[in-house]
Image (cartoon, coloured by chain):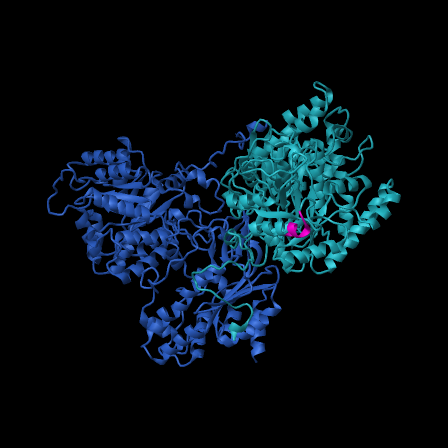
Chain colours: A cyan, B blue
């Protein structure tokens, strides 16, 4: 009887089966024992497996193509765009390879570094394009090794455009994309997922459509995992192509490349490059409105939506690949109208996970970097292992120095002029600094009428969760408790709570109240007297820029301040207050006063000297209220402190 | 100002200080990052450091000496005595070395194996005696290596008694205890804590009291960490000896050996062996009552108490070492009257920790072995690493086979005749088995008037915590849900709760409700139907002896069912329901039906066949209610199941 139930599985006591994951990768065995309750099995799967899982589940998905920017400022903007467009849930993004832009270099605008940033700092599954013509095997191998080292797992293998006008075969060189596919498989075995390009109308240089199909088949048999097509203008073009591919035995996923027309000139340029012909019915619409950008974009969106609908309705297409041209509006609009832009309010963990394979098991971080996750990732990039289950297990607690404030993924999104407007063209006293902090908390404009939407320690407006504490935060900032991080206590809210929830549904999340701030030594003196009353309840760490460190938690134990209990799982405790890491964080936190704020002003100017004074004399304080089931006592601690001072 | 506070410590951001532990051992660095909130720092300290810490804190402590038993049955009893006397909080126990008893062998009565059992299975800090005369260096090194391998960390280095009547020096051999001390230090560096013997009246073979003191000084300077003295009859004997030792530069702790007189014959024998003279005032009391054992023991207790008081009151003595003669009553009485027998109701973890250094970081175990911790320790003894922080991290999940039911530390404390009285001389049907389970739960006598105080899966009476569930357990056992393990759900009780609390004070403990039982396939069929209603809430694993396994938790994730939140700590989750381990446990759980119960009866007897039938046909079921903040639904699940069956 029992054996007839669906759940039955035979297992001997010593065997350990694979956990039922459909993943065939060698890492699936480790994963079967990793307890991190990521919402998306995605985090542990390779791209081709995710694609298959989504297809099997009948899910529709999309992906986004970007090209590397030309300038550092454009790179900052592109990264913000990755963050914003990443919110819609692309299955992956891809970054094109610009041979002219030194694509494998460490420049902040190189293809390699943009892809690295997308994976490591934005947590996006990413495909790096790579072209092979006019390059030696050693060059290519070097690029691939670097990509692997950076945590990139997917390559789009392309031939690239020949150097001269005419295409000439090189002896012993890479002449076709298939050579690159073979090379990747022979040198890197199954490490990379490989994507190749398909041409629904045939490659412009191919002898014929059929010959081109045969080339594609070669690429598939050489080891390509899936195909992304060149853009096309009519759905039937793609559907015929797909049937033709399947007919000759190409069984991997084929993803249509969608190009929402966004402007007259970009269309013309693309058509010229791709040697495609724009159908007459489209030309007829566009030519009359060619000077009306908005009209063209509206038409482009309309056209793309209708083509995508037809593709999806065919039942043959599960995913759509968008040529974004690094723009946001048109693609987002199309995706929203198709209903496949899905902002998932659920978070696997309270912080955004990185997509580097080394960080696959990472599930605990110090709370200090909560608003500077990219800096945290940067400063821990050399770690061999990432803490899993317990911060105390971390075997590599040495943080890299943060001297590279210029790095584009760490830079403020706002230019100097805007920062000055927010933080004050001229500071007159410490209180004018208090005011900046207060305006950031309240969202009210400052005395010059500008809203303070970021701070040196936080490049984004206040988090929803922090809003819960807004009134108290405002009160204390006004009086010189300059808060840079905080969280309320939570005693078992459902994991689906829209504000504080995270992790899979059916769980409960908890928090200890946390407050972190800069403040003067006078306030610290009073605070320490008050804290004596709270000795067993409140843990504190108080440190100045010189590293003088005052704490009542002398044994360097991390204190878990966020944790979750889930059905059928071990406990997850994703944020800790770690006394050791706090000393690395304080270097960064104090340096931000100077690097981001003081340096806005002339040397020797009063404004700069005020910031310098705070940097030199204030303390950085963190407080944890361990009694999470009771009302948060930290506000009382601060109030008692002010009372003592009066 | 701030720098004047007591807590101030300077620390650069990269340095990681030692956490303030007074331990000088090389392991202290790891410990500073181990998050296990053991109540006693003891677990991570070596004996000499514990001794110093207790002395510095002004604590009084005691230790207990035992000799290895002669028979396997006596060994079973001795281990029970270790467990009982361990509850009083000895700083350590020591086990004497019996050259005639093959002391270094694997026999269950050898000194080595008894000490091993005390450390690993009873969790007691243990000193193994070792004598060196008439042994080769290789023999001694072999013994020491074995001791180290077994997790023993302390050696009492003794000369031992010469083989013949007269003492002759051996060339190149070990002639004195000091040779052994030197050998241990030269071969094992600082690994072992070394204890040596002191003779308050001088060694009987020494040329003089002063010469003997000089020998002791040699042992101290050769590397002995502390001294335990031979017994003596007058406190002033010890106090003079101690002053004399200190006067010649012996600065280590000197612990008086206390011998509570327990009987006329044992006193005479000991006196003969130790060549001590009994003072006249004692003889005068004893001789007239020499045939009255109780009177002599009462006198002995009285005498010991008054001598110990005088020693402790002197301010020179912090610890007392008791020669127990493997007896319990007199020593326990003395300790209780002195007020240094301290049963600490607090538990560092919900289960008793082992004292093997390898297990120092262990803080999570599967719940299945909750009532068979010695079996769990035995089956995991070959593991190189023990899970810490997270069960999923465990790198060695392979359990040793349990074929050695005969091992004395795994055997039932009750002899066959008693087991038959409890579990039935004759079973007539499955229901008579239900009745045994029910009587065990209720504590009521069975139909023959015997109380069932143990079961094959549990050698002790019902745990206090399980008592919370008594009524429900009784009801379900009567109907054939044969429970062997359970715990109630707990939603944040103080860690000091006398029943379910554990860990340091100021914390909160939590549990998910758990129920584990054997039951028939008919009941399982109904249960599975009922469980569909509880699909998202209840995790189940159901397995029969052949390993047919039914579960709704297919990804082999461990489920944390006991956890605690403490001030300034990471989360501790000491018990999990681990699907992989469950399959190892089921082998053991099913085998216990046969090994412990069926084999009480004749082959082919109806009683034996009933147990065999249950073994062959029943399922082992475990259920976890994940919704710990709500009322435990597992009883409803069982009730629904019975309802469905009716």
| Residue situated furthest right in the rendering | A288
Horizontal and vertical percent for residue A104?
A: 60, 35
- In the image, residue A210 lies in the stretch drawn in magenta: yes
- Does B305 sit left or right of A344 as displayed? left
Q: Quadrant of residue B644?
A: bottom right
Image coords of residue B517 (percent x, y): 48, 69
Marker count (numbered): 0
What is the magenta segment's predominant secondary structure? helix
Residue B615 relative to residue B158: left or right? right
Residue at the image position 70 percent from the left and 18 percent from the top: A604
Q: Residue furthest front?
A: A207
Pick the residue in front: B255 or A629.
Answer: A629
Side (left or right) of B344 relative to A139: left
Residue A1 seen from this side:
yes
Quarter of the image with the C terminus of chain B in it: bottom right
Give the magenta part as a residue range: A207-213
Query: Quick check: A308 above or below A403?
Result: below
Residue A533: percent from left, percent from top: 60, 40
Within the magenta stretch, is there residue B570? no
Q: Nearer the viewer, residue B631 or A107?
A: A107
Determine whether A30 is above or below A584 in the image. below
């Amino acid at each position: 009887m029992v054996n007839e139930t669906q759940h039955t599985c035979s297992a001997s006591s010593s065997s350990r089966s694979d956990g039922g994951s459909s993943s065939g990768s060698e890492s699936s065995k480790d994963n079967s024992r990793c307890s991190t309750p990521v919402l998306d099995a995605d985090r542990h799967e390779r791209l081709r497996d995710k694609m298959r899982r989504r297809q099997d589940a009948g899910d529709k998905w999309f992906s986004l193509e970007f090209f590397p920017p030309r300038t550092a400022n454009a790179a900052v903007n592109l990264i913000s765009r990755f963050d914003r467009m990443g919110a819609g849930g692309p299955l992956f993004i891809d970054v094109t390879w610009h041979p002219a832009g030194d694509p494998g270099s460490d420049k902040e605008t190189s293809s390699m570094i943009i892809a690295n940033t997308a994976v490591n700092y934005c947590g996006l599954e990413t495909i790096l394009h790579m072209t092979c013509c006019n390059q030696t095997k050693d060059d290519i191998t070097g690029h691939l090794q670097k990509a692997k080292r950076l945590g990139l797992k997917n390559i789009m293998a392309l031939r690239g455009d020949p150097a001269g006008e005419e295409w000439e075969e090189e002896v012993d060189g890479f002449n076709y994309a298939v050579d690159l596919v073979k090379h990747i498989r022979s040198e890197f075995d199954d490490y990379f997922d490989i994507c190749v390009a398909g041409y629904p109308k045939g490659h412009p240089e191919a002898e014929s459509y059929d010959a081109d199909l045969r080339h594609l088949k070669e690429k598939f048999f050489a080891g390509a995992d899936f195909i992304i097509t060149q853009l096309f203008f009519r759905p039937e073009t793609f559907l015929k192509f797909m049937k033709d591919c399947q007919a000759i035995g190409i069984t991997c996923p084929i993803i249509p490349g969608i190009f929402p027309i966004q402007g007259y000139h970009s269309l013309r340029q693309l058509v010229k490059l791709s040697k495609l012909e724009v159908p007459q019915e489209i030309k007829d619409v566009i030519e009359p409105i060619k000077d009306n950008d908005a009209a063209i974009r509206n038409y482009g969106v309309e056209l793309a939506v209708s083509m995508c609908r037809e593709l999806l309705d065919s039942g043959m297409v599960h995913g759509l690949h968008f040529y974004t041209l690094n723009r946001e509006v048109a693609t987002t609009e199309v995706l929203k109208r198709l209903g496949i832009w899905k902002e998932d309010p659920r978070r696997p963990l309270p912080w955004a996970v990185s997509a580097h394979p080394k960080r696959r098991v990472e599930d605990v971080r110090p709370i200090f970097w909560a608003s500077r996750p990219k800096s945290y990732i940067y400063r821990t990039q050399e770690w061999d292992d990432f803490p899993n289950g317990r911060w105390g297990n971390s075997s590599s607690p040495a943080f890299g120095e943060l001297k590279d404030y210029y790095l584009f993924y760490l830079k403020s999104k706002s230019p100097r002029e805007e920062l000055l407007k927010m933080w004050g063209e001229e500071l007159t006293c410490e209180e004018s600094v208090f005011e900046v902090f207060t305006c950031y908390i309240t969202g009210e404009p400052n005395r010059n009428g500008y809203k303070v939407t970021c701070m040196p320690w936080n490049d984004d407006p206040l988090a929803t969760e922090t809003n819960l504490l807004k009134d108290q935060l405002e009160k204390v900032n006004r009086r010189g408790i300059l808060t840079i991080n905080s969280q309320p206590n939570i005693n078992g809210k459902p994991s689906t709570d829209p504000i504080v929830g995270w992790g899979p549904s059916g769980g409960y999340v908890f928090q200890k109240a946390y407050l972190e701030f800069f403040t003067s030594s006078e306030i610290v003196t009073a605070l320490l007297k008050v804290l004596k009353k709270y000795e067993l309840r409140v843990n504190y760490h108080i440190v100045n820029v010189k590293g003088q460190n005052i704490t009542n938690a002398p044994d360097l134990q991390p204190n878990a301040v966020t944790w979750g209990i889930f059905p059928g799982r071990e406990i997850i405790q994703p944020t800790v207050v770690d006394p050791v890491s706090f000393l690395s964080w304080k270097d960064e936190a104090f340096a931000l006063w100077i690097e981001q704020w003081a340096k806005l002003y002339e040397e020797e100017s009063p404004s700069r000297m005020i910031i310098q004074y705070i940097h030199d004399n204030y303390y950085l304080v963190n407080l944890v209220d361990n009694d999470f089931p009771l009302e948060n006592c930290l506000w009382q601690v601060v109030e008692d402190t002010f009372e003592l001072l009066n």
